[in-house]
């Protein structure tokens, strides 16, 4: 039988790689399973401005690579694969991927969150054909075209700003009359000169001819509907946690976030939650990284006992 890991981390975002760094530095035998590449949502962020230590900002993927290298320097092993099943009870936990099964005495769940869909009829069908959830991944396909961003949070604002540099025009469609993101962000967008705010409005239909050609938006006050012609729409209306794998084992809240406090302990001994999948008030790279450190040190304490 293969060696048992002291600590297995599921998810290679800032929470996962910080946990790997702390665990490996503490002398634990650490594995980290990541699905695509390092960074999670951070890895698809163009510019990270609010992670301390980078006064000029840093590209999200570059930061992810640095985090991975940092953990690797102390011996944390990265395993590529998608976890398909976990058995978290008992002293030895089992983690299955299509390529192999792993065992570990402690597990840190760090699978983060995924973009929320609008739930429109042809939204999934048009994914990759004008509908996107990642401006930094897909923005280049819309160079010099008109696009729309839906949402009013930090992601929507960052996406609209990024796209304003590439695209001819950007509509920012928000269901209220003020952004959730800080006011200063609105001023930055206004300065871009090619961003038009569409306030108090919801997207009702995705218009398409094989690919997206426009959106039908409805003003919630007047109920007036109009079509905005655009080649792409970037949906940035928040996230849903990636916790389906743990359902029925780990306690989740009503929205599916893992119920773990600031100590990152879940209801299962030896299982910890770190990052965006944990129920908490602020989801940022810095809070995910902090969770990773706390969870790894809690895992170490658990192993010491
Ligand atoms: P968010 O802050 O939850 O904002 C989601 C936005 O989408 C809100 O404006 C919300 O409207 C709107 N919305 C939600 N459901 C909708 C629907 N069905 N139809 C239309 N609009 C809908 O999500 P986020 O912007 O992805 O940010 C998630 C977390 O990451 C936040 O904590 C954020 O601060 C953080 N973040 C930080 C940075 C950064 O600081 N660099 C960058 C990205 C994200 P309402 O305002 O009306 O609720």
Image (cartoon, rainbow, N blue to C red):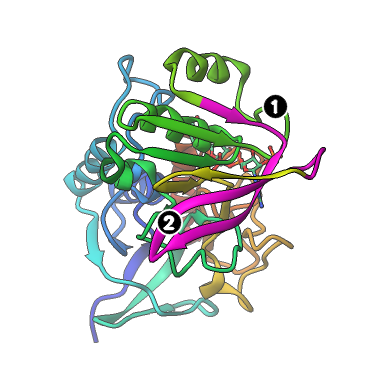
Q: Residue at x 55, y 14 (%)?
A: 187
Residue 207 among those drawn in magenta: yes
Which quarter of the picture shows residue 230? top left
Judge from the rendering whether residue 280 lies leftward or rightward of residue 54; answer left or right: right
Residue 131, percent from left and from top: 43, 55
Q: Residue at x 34, y 32 (%)?
A: 167
Q: Which residue is mark 1?
A: 178
Residue 122, percent from left and from top: 52, 68
- Residue 7 or residue 96, whichever sits in front: 96
Work out which residue is located at the far bottom of the displayed protein and give it: 1
Q: Does the residue tagged 1 have its C-beta within 8 Å of any atom of ligand 1?
A: no
**Residues drawn in magenta:** 196-223
Disc on the earlier residue, 2 or 1: 1
Residue 163 among those drawn in magenta: no
Are there few (<14), some (14-19), or many (20+) residues within 10 Å of tag 2? many
- Residue 65 or residue 117, whichever sits in front: 117
Q: Main secondary structure of the magenta part?
A: strand
- The N terminus sits in image quarter: bottom left
Residue 43 seen: no
Q: Which residue is mark 2?
A: 212
Q: Secondary structure at mark 2?
A: strand
Q: Secondary structure at mark 1?
A: loop
Q: Residue at x 31, y 68 (%)?
A: 5
Residue 184, percent from left and from top: 57, 14
User: What's the mark number on residue 115?
Assistant: none
Mark 2 or mark 1: which is in front? Answer: 2
Within the displayed image, which quadrant is ligand 1 positioned in? top right
- Residue 175 or residue 277, whichever sits in front: 175
Q: Does the residue tagged 2 have its C-beta within 8 Å of any atom of ligand 1?
A: no
Residue 183, percent from left and from top: 62, 17
């Amino acid at each position: 039988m293969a060696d048992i890991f002291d600590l297995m981390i599921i998810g290679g975002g800032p929470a996962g790689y910080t946990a790997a760094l702390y665990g490996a530095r503490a002398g634990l035998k650490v594995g980290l399973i990541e699905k695509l590449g390092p960074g999670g949502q951070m890895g698809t962020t163009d510019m990270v401005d609010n992670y301390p230590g980078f006064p000029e900002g840093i590209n999200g993927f570059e930061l992810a690579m640095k985090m991975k290298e940092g953990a690797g320097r102390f011996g944390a092993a990265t395993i590529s694969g998608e976890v398909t099943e976990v058995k978290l009870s008992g002293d030895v936990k089992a983690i299955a991927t299509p390529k192999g099964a792993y065992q570990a005495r402690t597990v840190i769940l760090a699978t983060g969150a995924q973009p929320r869909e609008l739930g429109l009829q042809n939204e999934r069908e048009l994914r990759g054909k004008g509908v996107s959830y990642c401006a930094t991944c897909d923005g280049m396909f819309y160079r010099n075209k008109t696009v729309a961003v839906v949402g009013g949070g930090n992601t929507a604002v960052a996406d609209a700003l990024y796209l304003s540099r590439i695209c001819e025009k950007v509509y920012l469609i928000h269901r209220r009359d003020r952004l959730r993101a800080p006011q200063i962000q609105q001023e930055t967008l206004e300065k871009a000169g090619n961003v038009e705010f569409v306030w108090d409005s919801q997207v009702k239909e995705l218009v398409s001819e094989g690919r997206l050609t426009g959106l039908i938006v409805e003003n919630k006050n007047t109920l007036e509907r109009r079509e905005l012609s655009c080649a792409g729409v970037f949906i940035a209306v928040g996230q849903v946690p990636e916790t389906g794998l743990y359902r029925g084992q780990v306690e989740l809240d009503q929205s599916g976030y893992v119920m773990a406090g600031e100590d990152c302990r879940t209801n299962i001994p030896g299982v910890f939650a770190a990052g965006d999948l944990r129920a908490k008030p602020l989801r940022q790279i810095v809070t995910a990284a902090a969770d990773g450190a706390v969870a790894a040190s809690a895992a170490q304490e658990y192993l010491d006992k």
